Amino acid sequence: MQTVIRSNAQEVIISPEHPTVIIGERINPTGKKRLAQALADKDMERVRRLALSQVADGAAVLDVNVGAAGIDEVELLPMAVRAVMEATDVPLCLDSANAEALRAGLEAYEGKALINSVNGEEASLARVLPLAQEYGAAVIGLCMDDDGIPSTIEGRVAVAQKIVERAASFGIPAEDVVIDCLAMSVCTDAAAGRVTLEAIRAVRETLGVNMTLGASNVSFGLPDREAINETFIAMAMQNGMNAPIVNPTQARKGILIADLLLGLDEYAMRYVGYVRSQRK
Ligand code: THG
C-alpha cells in the first residue's frame, strides 16, 4: 500500500515499509497573528521562510493552509502554493475546507498533490472527490460525517470505509486515500486518546490504507503539550499511522526514534545522521 505524492522534483512514498513521512503543519495562520496579517497583505515572505525552515527540520511534505478571518482562500491558496514551490522542492498538502480554494490550489500546483481533506459528509464527498479524480491527486479522508466525529472505534472505521469505497467509485484507488482517525483532547475526555489509537489499528487491519494524524489536538488544554504529543505520535505510529501532520521542529526526534524502534531505520542510518547533524 503505497501513496505516492510528487512535486516537479521529488517523489514521496507513504507506506508501512518506508520511514514515517513528516507533513509540516506550520504554514497555517491558526494562532499566528503575524502570518495571518502577512497573508491578508498578500506578502509571501513568511510563507517562504516557514517552508524552508520546516524542510531543514525534516518535513518531507508541507501542509499549506491559509484559512483565517478576512482571507479569501480562493485567491490566497494558489499564491501560497506558488510561493512554496519557488522556495522548496517538496510535495504539498493543500489544506482547506473550501472546495473552490482547493481547486484553485490544485490548478496552481505542479505535481501530484495531497488534498486535505474530504470527510464522510455527502456534501464533502460530492465536492472534493471529483477534484482528486480530475487532478490525479491523493486525498486525506477525515473520520467524521454529518453527525460529527464518532465516539466509538467502529464508528470511525465505518466513516473511513465509506470514504475509501466512495473514492473507488470515482476511480480513486485506496492507495490514494490517506485516512485521518482524528485526535481529540484527553483533557476533557479520558477515552479520547485510546479511541483514536484503536481506530488507527482497526483501519490498518480492515482497510490497510495509509494514515495521517494532526496529533497536537490530543494535548489541548494541558501543560507540556510537546511531551504528550511526542508519546501519542509514537503510539499512533505503532498502530499504523505513518504520515503525521506536525511541527517538525518539535516532533522530528521522537518520530525518528519511533521509526528506529519499529524497524523502519536500517542500521539506524537516519537516527544517527540526525544526531550527528545536531552536534555540529
Ligand atoms: N488533520 C488534518 N489536517 C489538519 C489537522 C488535522 N490541518 C490543520 C491542523 N489539524 C494541523 N495543523 C496545525 C497547525 C497549527 C497548529 C496546530 C495544528 C498550532 N499552531 C500554534 C497555535 O495555535 O498556537 C502556533 C504555533 C506555531 O508557531 O507553530 O497549534 O487534525 N488532516
Image (cartoon, grey):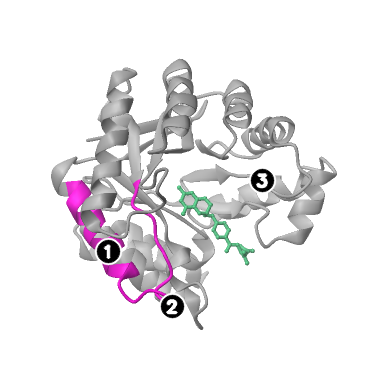
Task: Measuring from the top left, give residue 198's x and y in whole percent.
Answer: 22, 61
Magenta-colored span: 180-204
Residue projecting furthest to the right: 41
Assess disc 2: are there few (<14), some (14-19) or many (≥20) residues with their C-alpha within 10 Å of its C-alpha.
Answer: some
Task: Measuring from the top left, give residue 174's x and y in whole percent.
Answer: 26, 30
**233 with respect to 249 (left or right):** left
**Of the image marks 1 and 2, the number of the one nearer the N terminus:** 2
Residue type at mark 2 is Cys
Asked which quadrant contains residue 258, the reply is bottom left
Front-most of residues 268 and 200: 200
Task: Measuring from the top left, give residue 233's x and y in whole percent.
Answer: 35, 64
Residue type at mark 1 is Val
Nearest-to-viewer mark from 3 and 2: 2
Q: Secondary structure at mark 1?
A: helix
Assess disc 3: are there few (<14), some (14-19) or many (≥20) residues with their C-alpha within 10 Å of its C-alpha.
Answer: many
Tag 1 and tag 2, C-beta contact below 8 Å: no
Residue found 66% across the figure and 46% down from its top: 67
Nearest-to-viewer mark from 3 and 1: 1
How far apart marks 1 and 2 lie (CA) works out to 14 Å
The circle drawn on residue 184 is: none
The circle drawn on residue 187 is: 2
Q: Which residue is mark 1?
A: 195
How far apart marks 3 and 1 lie (CA) works out to 28 Å
Check residue 217 for magenta coloring. Answer: no
The circle drawn on residue 67 is: 3
**Of the image marks 3 and 2, the number of the one nearer the N terminus:** 3
Residue type at mark 3 is Gly
Front-most of residues 115 and 277: 115
Asked which quadrant contains residue 102, the reply is top right
Residue found 26% across the figure and 59% down from its top: 152
